[in-house]
Amino acid sequence: MGFGHETAFDMSEPLVAPGVEEKRYYASLTRNMVLIIMVVSFTPLILITGLIGYFFETYYRAKVLQNLYEMVEKHRQHINSFLNERLLNISFIADSYSYDQLSNQKFLSDKLATLQAVYPGVYVDWGVLQSNGAQIAYAGKFKLLNVNYGAADWFREARKKDHYVSDVFLGVRREPHFLICLRKRQGDREWLVRATVNFAAFNSVVEEIHIGETGSAFIVNNNGTLQSRPGIKPIDNLLGLLQMTSWGGGKGAGKTEIAGFRAPQVQMIPTGNGVTGVVRNRDRNFLFILMPLKSGDWTLVYQQERDDAFSQINRARTIALVIFFPGCLAIVLVTLFVSRKMVQRIEKAEREKELMNRQVIEAGKLASIGELAAGVAHEINNPVAVMVEEAGWMEDLLGDEKLGDCPNAEEFRRCLGQIKIQGRRCKEITHKLLSFARKTDPVPRLIRINDILGEIVDICKQRSKINNVPILTELTRDLPLISASPSEMQQVFINLINNAIDASGEGGTITIRSRLEEGSVVIDIEDTGQGIPGDILERVFDPFFTTKPVGKGTGLGLSICYGIVKKLGGSITVDSMVGAGTTFHVHIPLAGRAL
């Protein structure tokens, strides 16, 4: 029966437009909810993220440094093993053969060939030198026989020790190499056996460490001179770092400012056989590890940009931030959305509560008006009855009088007849109104539904004429009796018919049908109104649910009808199509039966 039915709240017409104070209150409520939700959400998130991030980063950095240190330590051992192995090779040959054998050119060449076959690419040449530095025997590709090395620095150092490993130098051959020397004595005779190690072979051992884009190892002596080819550019003022170690001459150990470095720029931590630290150089932070080689004469240096060394944790931090900030943004957006929705629901609930209170008051007013109407109808009924009786008495008196040729006699009789007819009509109307409004207990009794429908149609006929909505009836005769309260049945059908009149509008039609169906009497009330939308159709029987303007509907009519019919064991359903009309179906069980 369209939107004229008492169905859903018409929130498009709010009871009271929200004032400035209400807007401020709900805005403040929204802000407080947003603040509370964000604090509750962000506080544990930030704390947990910070703590986990701190401990993870601390652990990861420690593990990276530990792994790098262990790797450099293994590399140092590998380099020392390489040098010791070369020294053992020379010692074995020098101890196994006499001076005369080793000073023989052919014998020395045979031994060199044997070593080069066993260790390919390692040994360049061999030589035997007298105590004055003259090389009396030589095996190799250069012409160095009878060359005197008495003035060479390496020769003077070699004569002081039983075995000696020189720094890398160019020498007369003009290419980088270093020597391993062994001092031998036999009686008063002293000589040196020396071997030249291939720099490329030695450098390949050192260059085995290469991590990331900037991680590389190389060797320097205590003067800061490179002893291997570095894979990257060494740290500036590397000598300053060497002087801060315990083996780098020992002179600079413990100083806070050496070779252009200040204490805030360098962090050094003694660890095991070496030191680790971070130095600021060329506007970048470099991680370094220093370890002694060759009894402290050389230093194995590993350096890497700190960002490169910790690239994985930097990447993890970036990924965490990429997840964290969108997550925070999502929390903010959800918080704003949820808070606004909740405040809107609170505001709607408050408005509905106020509307419900108004409608309860309207319902009370209607009840009071109903009582007043019943009283007025009762008071009117008595004088109308007197008027009808008096009119009858006057008619009897006129019949007894001999009016003769009185020209108005017939007009008197006609007027008295009209008074009696209209009086009886008024009495009938007030009787029906009293019957409907009378406060009697809803005690069920056996009734004929068609009789109730006939009375209700008579009551509603005048309103339907005013609205130009004819009421048609298609009532099945001789329907079985039902057990119900007549006043409650009147209330149900008056509500449904009045709603149908409102929904149909001027020019519409209402059809009332009654029939027997599967042990129940079914009453259909059909209108030709605009129909009810599907989203509202499900709520038409909810209490205080109406689409009528404020003051024209309480939202209780259909809810009361539903309750009455359900109490009888029946049911009430509705079919509607927008633009075509609506039909309510009232199913009432026959006397002695229930659905």
Image (cartoon, grey):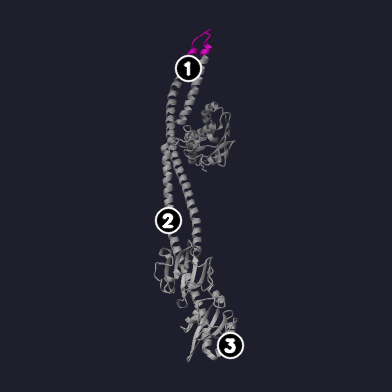
In the image, residue 287 sits, relative to residue 546, either above or below, namely below
**Labelled disc at residue 44:** 2
Q: Give the range drawn in magenta.
A: 392-412
The answer to whether residue 85 shows anywhere in this view is no
Q: Position of residue 535 (x, y in %)?
A: 54, 41
Q: Rounded to the nearest whole Å, what is the CA distance between mark 1 and mark 3? A: 171 Å
Q: In the image, is residue 32 part of the stretch drawn in magenta?
A: no
Q: Where is residue 260 in the image (x, y as percent from the top left)?
A: 44, 65
**Disc 1 element:** helix
Q: Position of residue 161 (x, y in %)?
A: 46, 83
Q: In this view, does 576 lie to the left or right of 224?
A: right
Residue that appears at 50% across and 66% down = 304
Q: For the residues carrying marks 3 and 2, which lies nearer the camera in this image? A: 3
Looking at the rendered structure, the kind of residue marked 3 is Gln
Residue that appears at 44% across and 20% down = 386
Q: Position of residue 78 (x, y in %)?
A: 51, 77
**Labelled disc at residue 391:** 1
Residue that appears at 47% across and 51% down = 331
Q: Rounded to the nearest whole Å, what is the CA distance between mark 3 and mark 2? A: 83 Å
Q: Which badge, 1 or 3, is on the more N-terminal residue?
A: 3
Query: Label 2: few (<14), some or many (≥20) within 10 Å?
Result: few
The answer to whether residue 33 shows anywhere in this view is yes
Q: Nearer the viewer, residue 253 or 74?
A: 253
In the image, residue 300 sits, relative to residue 388, either above or below, namely below
Residue position marked by numbered label 3 in the rendering: 105
Q: Which badge, 3 or 2, is on the more N-terminal residue?
A: 2
